[in-house]
Image (tube, helix red, strand yellow):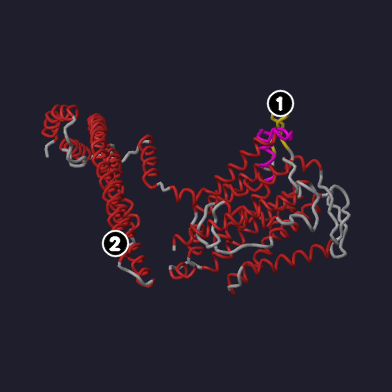
């Protein structure tokens, strides 16, 4: 249609539509509104030989580059031709830019005004329908109950009563199903109006989104899909833990233990979480594959002992299988650091691969393969070192990596920032990127969800499983290296860390059933467990009783996960 004709028709319709909206007249449809259609047609004509043509030609260039049937010279010729056409189309874009912006702005403003009136109208109509549907449902339930009571008057035997009772429940179920179906239709209708509005505005702006619209749409979509039962199932444990922390914060000053919720305490919790974050990030991948890892604690000890030996100031007091003691102080500190980190990672990866091969190749459950590697490391460490602590590491390097930066004095308190938080944040970013932005990460979810289906679709289950074990070993090695900066390392370092790491992942929503979970869940789980221990210690709760709290949280998390899994099935 001619552009000028469309402009004239729009100007004529605008006056009539403004009066119609102001009068509150009933609107039959949003998408089929006459003026909106005219605006859409006009903007399409303005963009047809300009913006849309540029997009079309760019797509043809991409398709030409990928076309293996064309000779290189032919490709070059076609692409040059498309580029020449793009330059012509850009002149049309420039010529129509002002009118495009003007009518696009007008159209969106009219769309918003129309939506405001139409949504109120639809909401009113659908709410009235919902009231009628609810009344009909209540009436149906009353009739079913009345009929059932009459039937029971003539029934004597228990068998017949049981049959009639089943029929009664079935009738109620059918009535409720019909009620929910009709109610959902009304909700769908109300939600569709807002969806149509946003899609129309995006179309009028040539696909451009608007943050305020996206946020409003996201909120409405959340309200539309919100179910209290599902919300409590997904977040009930977190709400209970939040209540527990609030109670601890209130009780702490009353009991004379001081202020729990303070910046120094928060930073201390994050510092204590920092090294444990590495272990949770490592085992999270194995849990995603419906596995686990019981060797974490011994890998922590292995990496920490190696780091302590290399970074010890002066002659070591520890011998390993009769070798040593050693003195590494003649080696430059940067080289010693790299040696310690590399050896810690290499050894952890080696033992992780040892367990991984049996799991990936022989299908032995990780519980068994990692238990075996745990016992092997445990025996080698204790026999090799006789259980002797390696002593502290060089104070200079300990402060450089494991110390704190002084931030200043706030409210009479010296605030210091733990340096170990930085590598933990880096590890979280790396893990998030692997899980969410790489093919390997997508394959992890596929193998964890259904390994047989993943294999049929061309994914190497063996390679993915080994990759997850290697990734876990790298995280363990880095965490063990940093663990040596917190305390004197020995063969007993890291005792119980494997259970805390596994529990943190489960509490964070990474399912033991495989294929479900996010890296953010593991992070939240670590912080929750570390905070729990810190709060209980701060309040003076006996260490043995702390295990009771942890036990209840773990069983609650696994129980909720099982319920969600059964519901999905």
Q: Quadrant of residue 93?
A: top left
**Residue at mark 2:** 150
438, 279: nearer the viewer = 279
Q: Nearer the viewer, residue 76 or 304?
A: 304
Label 2 CA crowd tier, 10 Å (few <14, some 14–19, many 20+): few
> SS at mark 1?
strand
Most common SS among magenta residues: helix
The span shown in magenta is 253-273
- Whether residue 88 is visible here, answered yes or no, is no
Closer-to-camera residue (367/451) = 367
Q: Residue at position x 38%, y 69% from top?
A: 162
The picture places residue 520, in percent across and down from the top left corner, at 55, 48
Question: Is 498 rendered above or below residue 356?
Answer: above
In the image, residue 386 lies at what x, y percent?
Answer: 86, 62
Q: Horizontally, is 470 left or right of 408 in the view? A: left
Disc 1 target residue:
409
Q: Residue at x 61, y 38 (%)?
A: 246
Pointer 2 with pointer 1, Cβ within 8 A: no
Category of crowding for the residue at label 1, using alpha-carbon neighbours closer than 10 angstroms: few (below 14), some (14–19), many (at least 20): few
Image coords of residue 533 (percent x, y): 69, 46
Residue at 19 percent of width and 27 percent of height: 22
């Amino acid at each position: 249609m001619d552009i000028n004709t469309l402009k004239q028709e729009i100007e004529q319709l605008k006056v009539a539509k403004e009066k119609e909206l102001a009068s509150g007249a009933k609107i039959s449809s949003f998408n089929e509104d006459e003026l909106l259609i005219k605006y859409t047609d006009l903007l399409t004509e303005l963009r047809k030989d300009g913006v849309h043509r540029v997009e079309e030609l760019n797509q043809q260039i991409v398709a030409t580059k990928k076309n293996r049937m064309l000779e290189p010279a032919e490709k070059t010729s076609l692409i040059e031709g498309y580029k020449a056409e793009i330059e012509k189309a850009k002149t049309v874009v420039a010529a129509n830019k002002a009118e495009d912006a003007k009518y696009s702005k007008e159209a969106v403003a009219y769309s918003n005004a129309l939506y405001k009136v139409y949504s109120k109208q639809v909401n009113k109509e659908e709410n009235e329908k919902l009231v009628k549907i609810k009344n009909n449902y209540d009436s149906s339930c009353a009739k079913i109950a009345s009929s059932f009571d009459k039937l029971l008057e003539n029934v004597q035997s228990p068998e017949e009563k049981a049959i009639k009772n089943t029929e009664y429940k079935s009738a109620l179920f059918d009535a409720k199903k019909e009620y929910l179906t009709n109610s959902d239709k009304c909700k769908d209708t109300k939600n569709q109006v807002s969806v149509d509005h946003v899609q129309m505005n995006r179309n009028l702006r040539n696909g451009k989104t608007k943050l305020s619209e996206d946020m409003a749409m996201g909120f409405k979509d959340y309200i539309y899909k919100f179910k209290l039962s599902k919300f409590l199932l997904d977040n009930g444990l977190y709400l209970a833990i939040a209540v527990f922390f609030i109670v601890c914060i209130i009780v702490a000053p009353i009991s004379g233990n001081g202020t729990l919720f303070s910046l120094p305490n928060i930073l201390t919790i994050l510092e204590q979480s920092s090294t444990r974050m590495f272990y949770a990030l490592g085992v999270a991948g194995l849990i995603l594959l419906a596995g686990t890892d019981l060797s974490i604690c011994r890998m922590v000890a292995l990496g920490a002992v190696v780091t302590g030996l290399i970074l010890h100031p002066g002659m070591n007091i520890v011998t390993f299988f009769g070798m040593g003691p050693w003195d590494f102080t003649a080696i430059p500190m940067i080289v010693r650091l790299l040696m310690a980190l590399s050896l810690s990672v290499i050894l952890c990866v080696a033992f992780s691969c040892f367990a991984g091969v049996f799991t990936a190749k022989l299908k032995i459950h990780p519980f068994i393969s990692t238990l075996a590697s745990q016992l092997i490391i445990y025996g080698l460490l204790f026999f090799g070192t006789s259980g002797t602590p390696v002593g502290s590491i060089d104070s200079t390097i300990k402060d450089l990596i494991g110390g704190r930066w002084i931030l200043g004095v706030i409210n009479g308190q010296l605030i210091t920032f733990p340096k170990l938080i930085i590598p933990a944040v880096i590890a979280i970013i790396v893990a998030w990127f692997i899980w969410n932005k790489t093919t390997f990460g997508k394959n992890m979810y596929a193998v964890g969800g259904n390994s047989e289906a993943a294999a049929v679709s061309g994914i190497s289950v063996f390679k993915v499983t080994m990759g997850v074990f290697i990734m876990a070993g790298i995280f363990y090695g880095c965490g063990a290296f940093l663990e040596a900066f917190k305390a004197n390392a020995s063969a007993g370092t890291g005792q119980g860390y494997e259970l805390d790491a596994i529990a943190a992942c489960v509490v964070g929503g990474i399912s033991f059933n495989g294929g479900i979970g996010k890296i953010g869940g593991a992070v939240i789980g670590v912080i929750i467990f570390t905070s729990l221990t810190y709060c209980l210690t701060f309040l003076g709760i006996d260490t043995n009783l702390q295990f009771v709290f942890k036990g209840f949280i773990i069983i609650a998390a696994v129980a909720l996960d099982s319920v969600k899994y059964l519901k999905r099935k």
